[in-house]
Image: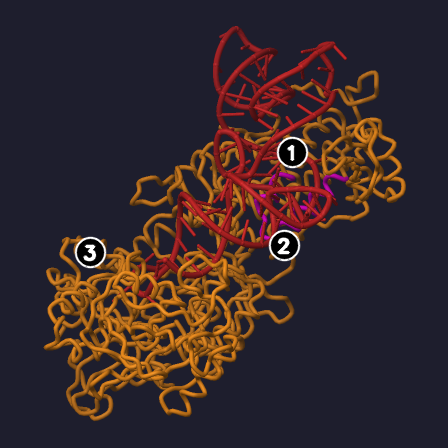
Chain colours: A orange, B red
Amino acid sequence: MSMVFNVDFMSIEREGSRSIDADSDGHAAFNGHYSLLFMDYDHQKIEAKWQEKWAEAATFEVEVDDEMPKFYNLCMYPYPSGALHQGHVRNYTFGDLLTRYKTMNGFNVLSPMGWDSFGLPAENAAIETGIHPRENTEAQIRTMTQQIKQLGAMYDWTRELASHSVSYYRWDQWLFLQLWDQGLAYKREAPVNWCPKDQTVLANEQVVDGVCERCGTPVEKRNLAQWFFKITDFAERLLDDLDQLDEWPDRVRTMQRNWIGKSRGARFSIRVADSDLSFEVFTTRPDTIFGMTFAVLAPEHPLVEQLISDGPNEKEARDYILAAGRASEIERLSEGDKTGVFTGGYAVNPVNGASVPLYIADYVLMGYGTGAIMAVPGQDQRDWDFASKYGIDIVRTVQPPADFDGEAYVVEGVTVNSGFLDGMQRDKAVDTIIDWFVEEGIGERTIQYRLRDWLISRQRYWGSPIPMVNCPDCGLVPVPEDELPVVLPDIRDFAPKGQSPLAALEEWVVTTCPSCGGQARRETDTMDTFVDSSWYFFRFADPLNEEMAFDPAKAAYWMPVDQYIGGVEHAVLHLLYARFITKFLFDRGLSSVEEPFARLFTQGMITLDGAKMSKSKGNVVDPLDLFESHGADALRLYHLFMGPPTDDAGWDTNGVDGTLRFLERLWKVVTEKTTFDDRADSTELIAEAHRTIKKVTEDIDRFRFNTAVPPLMTLTTSLIDAARTGIRGDVFEFVSEALIKLLAPMAPHLAHELWELTGHDSMLATESWPTWDPDVAKQTSVTMVIQVNGKLRDRIEVDVDISADRAKELALGSEKVAAWIDGKQVQRVIVREPNLVNVVVG
RNA sequence: GCCCGGGUGGCGGAACGGUAGACGCGAGGGGCUUAAACCCCCUUGAGCUUUCGCAGCUCGUGUGGGUUCGAAUCCCACCCCGGGCACCA
C-alpha cells in the first residue's frame, strides 16, 4: 500500500526555493537519489477515483447554450458485441481526447454514446441458445458501458440511446412513414440468397463460397417482395455535395463518388433479328456502335426466356443461367475468364443493319443499366476477352497509334470504320450518333448511376418492424402515425421457417386495415440496421422526446456533427445512407443542415501479426487485462502513440510498457522532492516547453496524435534533467503544469491526480488549454546543411535570422565544402536560409 | 474483377520536395543491488576506410524508369499487402 500525503508540496518547496546543497559551482547538487517521497503511481486507485469524480461533477452533461460555441463530437455508435476490443479503445480514445481538448478550449461539447443494438449476431445467438436477443443485447450493453467507463472516456450518459428500445425504433417507423408519404419507400421483387435446407434468407456474410455457412447447402437466388428507399432520387445531390465536404478524407469522398458512379451516355433500343422483340442498352460509348459485333443480355434479363426456349442452345443456356444464379455478384465480376452462352438469336445493329450474335453472359448485371449491352470488343477489354474466347469478330472504330500493342483500345482517338462518324473525335462522334438515335426515335441522351436503391427489408426478427399493413381490399396501407409504435412482439422460437419469425405469430400478424377496417395482415419484415444508424445523431440532440423524433430547434443547435469518428469500413454504406436521410429531413424542414457530418475522421484497424485483431481469429488482446496491469491512461497513450490514427497499426503490448514507463517518469519528477536553485539558467527549458505546447496543440488540431506524444516525452526528460542539475521553482512549476495540462485529454486520470497533488482545487477538465508565446518558442540557432550537388557535405550552426548572402558566404567558406568544389566550376548556389545551401558544381 | 488506401532499421513508426530513421519497443554493453527485478547511463540501418577522432566515404525508403540543383515525398509502369463491393456492423 502506498502512502498518501495530500499536501501542497509546491508551496512548501517554493518557500524554501533556495539551493540547500549547492556545490562549489553554485549548481544544485541533485545527488541522483530517487526515493519515493510522496507516493507511488497507483493507476488502479487513481483511475477509479477520478472516474467517480467526473461522474459526480457531471462535467460532460450538456445543454443547449446559445452563449457558447458548440462542438458535437461523435464516435460511431457501437454494436453491443459483448466486450470492448482494441478497435473500440482506439475509437473512444480519439473521441475522448477531442471531447476533453475542446472542453478545455471553451466549447460546449456534446459527446453522446448509444448502441446499434439491433442486428444479426444477437438473432443468430438466439437461434442457437434460445436466449432472447433483448436479454442478451442488454447484458452486453451493461458490460460494455462498464468497460467504456473504465477507459475514462466521458459521455453525456443522460442522452444514452439504444436502437432496440421502443422509444428509439418507433421513430425509425415514423421515418419510414415520412419516406412513404413522399413516395420514397416502395416495394418490389428482388433476389435474395436462399438456403433451401434451412428455409431461410441468408445475409451475404452467411454465404461462403456459394454455400450456406451453417449447413453447407448450395445457396440459391430467390425473388421476394422487398422494401426499398429511393436513394437514387438523391444521387445527384449526394454526388454534388461531396464537394462541400472538404474536411472529409479525400479517399472517402472518392469512394462515394465512384459508388454513386455517374456516367453520361446513351440509351437506345436494339431489335432482335427475325422477330418483333427488342431490348434497351445503355452505353457510355455510343460513338463506337459501328464496332458492335455482338450483344449480351444478363442471365436474368426478361427477354432471355423467349430467346432460348426451343432454340438450339436451350439446354446449355438453362444450365448457364442456373449456375450464374448461384454465383455472388463479386464472383461474377471477378471471374478472370469471361463466360457466356449463345442464345441462338441475333441482334440487329441499328446503324448498319448488321446481324450480330446475341449472348447471355454473367459479367452483365441485371442491376446496372438495362441489363443488356452492345459489345464492342475493339474498344472494351472485357468485350475483347469475350470475343477472343468465342471467336467473334473484332472491328476497331478508333484508330490506335502505330506503336499500340495492347488489345482493346479504350482511349480517345479518331473514329474510323464508322460510316458517317468517320474522322470525328470522340465527343463529336458521341453527340452526332445520339442526335441520330433521337431522329430515328430509337434512343436518347441519358445519365446513368451505378447507385441502386436501398433495400431496407429483412426477413428477420431482431429489427424495427416495418409499419405497414397488407389489406386485401386497399393494398399496402401505412400504420397511422398516431398508432405508432408497432411494438416488436416477444417470441420464443427464433428458428427460421421460410419467412421472418414474426410471420409465425398469427395473433400479431392479423390486424385491421387502418383504411377500411377490414381484416388485414401486418408486414412481417423488419428494417435494415442501417436505417437505425442513418439518423441516430439527430436523436442525440433530443433523446428523451416522447412527442417527436427530435425537436428541430435542438437539432439545429447541435447539428451538424462537428467531428465524426469511426472505422473506414463505413466509408460508403453507412455514411451514404446517413447523408441521404439528412437531406431528406432537410427537405422536410426538420434538419437545418443538408450534410450531417462536417468533419470525418476514419481510423485504421488494429492488427496482430499482420491480421485484423478479431475474436474469430483468436488474436485479441483484452483491454480489461491492460486496465489492470498498465492502466487506462497508459493504454490510451499507447493508442495515440502507436502510429498515424488513420493507418492500420500493429499491436505490441511492449509498447504499452513504454507509455507506462513514460507516465511513471513524469509522475516521479512531479511528485518527488526537488531542490530548487534560483540562479539556474532555464531559458532553453522554458523555450522547449513553449515549443511543446505549440507542437501538441497543432498536432491535435491536425489529428496527428502520434506526433503529439513524443515532444511530451522529450520535455519530461528535459524536466528530469533540469531537476537533477538545477532548476528554478517557478520554471519547474510552469513546465510541470504545461505537461499536466497537455496530458489532460490523453491520460486524464494521471493528469487530474497530478493537478490535485500540485495544489489545485479546480477540476483540470474545465481548466483552459495552455498557450504559447511565439517569441519564446522561437529557435535562436539552427543547423544549416551544406550540400554539394545535392549531397550533404557539412553542417554549420547558424542564427535563425541569417541572411541569404551570409548563408552563401559561410557555405562557400567551409573547408569541407572547398575540398569538394576543388578544381570544379561553381555553376549555381541554391540558398534556403537558414536550413540549407546547395552548391552546384560541374 | 472493380473502387480506395499502403509498402521506410529487428519491430511500431518520424521526416513543409531540402540533415532519412524523431519518439517508443526490442537487442547489446555498463551502473545500482549480496543477487534479481525495477530504475539510471551508453550503443544500435548496411558496408568500407581508419591516423580509432562524437573522423571520412559509399550504399540505403517494394522494383524499374522519369522530372528536379535536390525525391521516401511529384509523374509513369510493375510487384506485393490491406479495406470496400450494396443482407456483418
Please state the total of marks drawn on the protein image: 3
Disc 2 packing (10 Å; few <14; some 14–19; many ≥20): many
- Which residue is denoted by mark 1 in the rendering? A670
- Which residue is denoted by mark 3 in the rendering? A131
Q: Name the residue at 53% across, 73% down.
A: A241
Q: Same chain for labels 2 and 1? Say yes or no.
A: yes
**Can you see residue A638?**
no
Q: Secondary structure at mark 3?
A: loop
Where on the picture, by quarter, is residue A307?
bottom left
- Which residue is denoted by mark 2 in the rendering? A104
The numbered mark, 2 or 1, whose residue comes first in the sequence reads 2
Q: Chain of mark 1?
A: A
Front-most of residues A184 and A791: A791
Magenta part of the protein: which range?
A: A687-711
Whether residue A775 appears in magenta in the rendering, the answer is no
Front-most of residues A811 and A697: A811
The numbered mark, 3 or 2, whose residue comes first in the sequence reads 2
Whether residue A705 appears in magenta in the rendering, the answer is yes
Tell me the kind of residue under disc 1.
Val
Tell me the kind of residue under disc 2.
Met
In whole angstroms, how far apart are the C-alphas of marks 3 and 2? 45 Å
Q: Name the residue at 51% across, 54% down.
A: A95
* Above or below A219: residue A456: below
Marks 1 and 3: in contact by CB < 8 Å?
no
Q: Is residue A654 left or right of residue A463?
A: right
The numbered mark, 3 or 1, whose residue comes first in the sequence reads 3
Q: Main secondary structure of the magenta part?
A: helix
Tell me the kind of residue under disc 3.
Ile
Q: Position of residue A277 (x, y in %)?
A: 23, 86
Disc 1 packing (10 Å; few <14; some 14–19; many ≥20): many
Q: Position of residue B55 (x, y in %)?
A: 74, 21
